[in-house]
Every structure is written in C-alpha cells, then in structure tokens.
Image (spheres, helix red, strand yellow):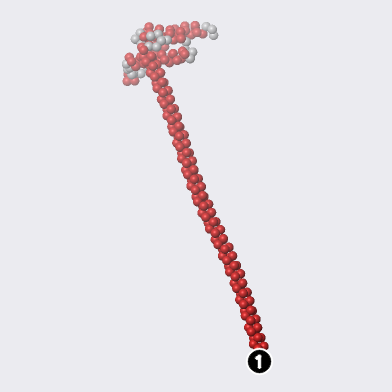
Amino acid sequence: PEDFGFNMRNYMMTRLKEMNKMVRDAEEEIPDKYWIKTTQFVQDDIDHFSKRVRMTLQESEVNNSTALKLFWKIRCRLDPSRGECKVSPDQMNTREKQLADKKRDEAKRLQEQKLREQKRLELEREKQVNAQEQQALEQERIEKEKLAQEQERLALEQQRLKEERRKLEQKKLEQQRLIQEQVKLEQERLKLEQEKLALQEAKKELNESNRSIWEILFGWMW
C-alpha cells in the first residue's frame, strides 16, 4: 500500500525496546569464553570493511545514498569513536586511500606480471619457432648433402659405366680386328694352298714333259 512505509516505521518505533531487550538477552546467553576481544585497529578495519560493502551496494544502486548517510550520522552520534566517523561516508579516509592504493598497486603488479608472462611466453614461442626453423634448415642442409652425395655417386657410377663401355668397345674392336686378321690369314693360307697345288701341278707337268723327251730320245736310239 502507499502508506506501508509510514506504518512500518511507526510499528518499528513501538518495537524498538522489545527488540533491544531481545538482543541483550541473546548476548547474555553466550558464555564469556566465546567472546573475542578485538583491538581498536581490528574494530576500525571491520568498520571500513562494512563501509566498503555499503559503498559497493550504493554504486550498484542497491542502497540509497541519503539513507546510508543518515545511518552513518546516527552511528557516529551514538559512538563517535568509531573509525568510520573520522570522515564523511562518501569520502575516503587515509586508511581507505592506502587500501585503494595498495589494491591499485597490486592490480598494476598483476598486470605487469601478466605482461611479463605474456612476453616470456612470446619469447618461448619465438625460441620454439626459431628452433623449428633451425631444425628445418639443418634437415634441409642434410638433405642437400645427401642429394649432393647421391649425385656424386651417380656421376662416379656413370663414369665407371662409361669407362666399362669404352673398354667393351675396345675389346669388341680388338675382337673384330682379330677376326679380320684370322680371315686374312685364312685367305693367305688358302692362297698358299692354291699356289702349292699349282706348283705341284706345274712340277707334275714338268716331270711328264721330261719323261716324254727321254722317251723320244730313247725311242729314236732304239
């Protein structure tokens, strides 16, 4: 309803004493051994933490800034020794500035650390790439050396085959020459045989001629 806020505030005003008594009764039921005594520094730190929470909620528009400032005035009027009462709730005190500076320095340090890590990773990647390139170049050099050795081996093999072919051709020519000489010798032998036969035939004819002459001579004498 439109008057809900007004009625709720009036209702709370009538219940304040009862609620305070309920809180005191609850605290008295807690044994003394469970109570922790804190220093003023710790208490101030708790107050500052609560303040940071409230300011964060204010920035996200969860808490109303006017109400927060009113509550701050009430707290500081009841207990002026509170650490948050030294400055206005919408301002930072020295400790909060130190915490903010520390937080900013920490963020800067983390950012620098992140940048250094990124740079280190980039250097590592660059080294890895360089190593891979060096390995590729070394592999290429080895392949070139193998190719050069293989080409040299093939050249030597071709030279050897060429030399063997030349020797075979020389041997073939030598065989052809020997065959020609054998043919020539055979022709000369046949010629000699023919001349021998012709000589024998001529000798035979000469003997027959001589015998005929003697027969004529001896026949005349008889």
Position of 179 compared to 119: left or right? Answer: right
Asked if residue 59 lies left or right of residue 85, the reply is right
Which residue is at the front of the view, 218 or 72? 218
The answer to whether residue 153 shows anywhere in this view is: yes
Instruction: Residue 33: give x, y in percent of width and height.
Output: 32, 20
In the displayed structure, 4 sits above or below 201; it is above
- Quadrant into which the C terminus falls: bottom right
- Placement of 5 over or under 156, stated as above or below: above
Residue under the point 50% across and 51% down? 156
Q: Of 173 and 127, which appears nearest the observer?
A: 173
Q: Residue at 42% x, 10% y: name it.
A: 90
Q: Can you say whether 157 is above or below 210 in the image? A: above
Q: Is residue 57 above or below residue 195?
A: above
Which residue is denoted by mark 1 in the rendering?
221
**Residue 112 percent location from the top left of the image:** 41, 23
The residue drawn where x is 51% and y is 47% is: 151
Instruction: Please give the name of the residue rendered at 55% of the width and 62% of the height, measured from the top-left corner.
Output: 174
Q: Percent from the top left, x then y, of residue 139? A: 47, 41
Q: Quadrant of residue 178?
A: bottom right
Q: Quadrant of residue 166?
A: bottom right
Secondary structure of the residue carrying numbered label 1: helix
